Amino acid sequence: LARSYTTIPPMADGALFPVANALAIGAYQQAVNEAQTLMGLSETEATERDALMYRAYIAMGSPKVVLDEVTDGAPMALQAVKLLARYVNSNGAESDAILATITEWLADPACSTNPTVLLMAATIYAREGNYNEALKCSHVGTTLDLMAMSVQMFLQLDRVDFAEKQLRAMSQLDDDATLTQLATAWVNVRLGGNKIQEAYYVYSELGEKFSWTARLYAGCAACQMHMGRFEEAERDLLEALSKDAKDSDALANLIACAMHLGKPTARHVTQLTSVDPNHPALLRMKSLEDSFARASAASVA
């Protein structure tokens, strides 16, 4: 169940860096607060600021804010973020219509080169479990956020070799960037061995340098789990949940920790079901339960 990577926020330089960096480490309210203090920006910068801020609202579980505030006449980047908000708000019920919109946008040269459009399309495809289509969107980009998304998709497709190659390209672009550091941690976890300890140090250093968030604690916990340190992982996950009680990956990994430590899991399963009923961990558990039920029925028959 251990997962150490998640949806990627865009990065930015200059005046927008505090917003983008807060989003990258999972400090969503901080990202919103930083965005609301930024004034005197160019039209392009203001659009990017708003895209970052609205993505933070989605990550905090408030997609309706985006749906209410982004008008039909808003710039394309904000329309793309609104499409993700619509997807999240509908719990996938509008998938067909939303995927049709993405297909239409990607066929339009004016939209298909917009980094935010590509990132939102990749994010939605990834949430649909269509990692190949997500990769087609992210792999054409040369920004750090799209490159980081490609790293995630390669890892999902078990192509660690390609993920490493993409990570090298990120390092050449900006080795010190937060997204590059996070991507390094994701790849190192998959490489295993001593690399897992290095990944743990990445999360720890980011927490000390900026601020500890549920995302960073959960990353540390995933490393601890891979190293067999389940008690330490449990402590990190509880810290993660103290930062964000609805962090679905933290809850999922807490279930795994409880299993390894021989502790009850029912409460954590109930919490995760309430927060994210379609979480991969729950779907896997349901599949295993169904398989067991079928096997039991067959043996009785």
Image (cartoon, rainbow, N blue to C red):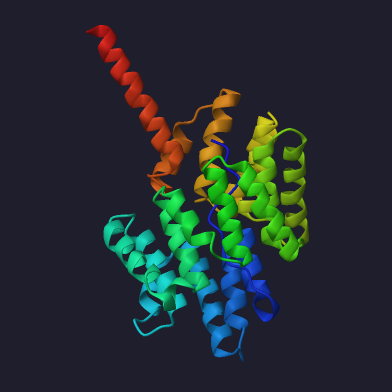
Q: Nearer the viewer, residue 251 or 119?
A: 119
- Quarter of the view holding residue 161: top right
**Most distant residue in the left direction:** 301
Up-down: is 197 above or below 31?
above
Q: In percent of the image, x 51 and y 39: which residue is there? A: 252
Q: Is residue 160 above or below residue 7?
A: above
Residue nearest the viewer, comparing 246 with 141: 141
Q: Residue at x 36, y 25 (%)?
A: 289
Residue 45: x and y, percent? 58, 83
Report whether residue 65 is seen.
no
Q: Residue at x 47, y 57 (%)?
A: 136
* Viewer-proximal residue among 20 and 104: 104
Indicate the position of residue 68 as horizontal and vertical percent values: 36, 76
Q: Quadrant of residue 18?
A: bottom right
Q: Is residue 233 left or right of residue 279?
A: right
**Residue 293 in sight here:** yes
Count of numbered labels shown in the rendering: 0
Please state the horizontal and vertical placement of residue 24, each as a whole percent of the image.
62, 62
Q: Residue at x 64, y 77 (%)?
A: 16
Residue 105 place in picture, x, y as percent: 37, 71
Q: Quadrant of the C terminus?
A: top left
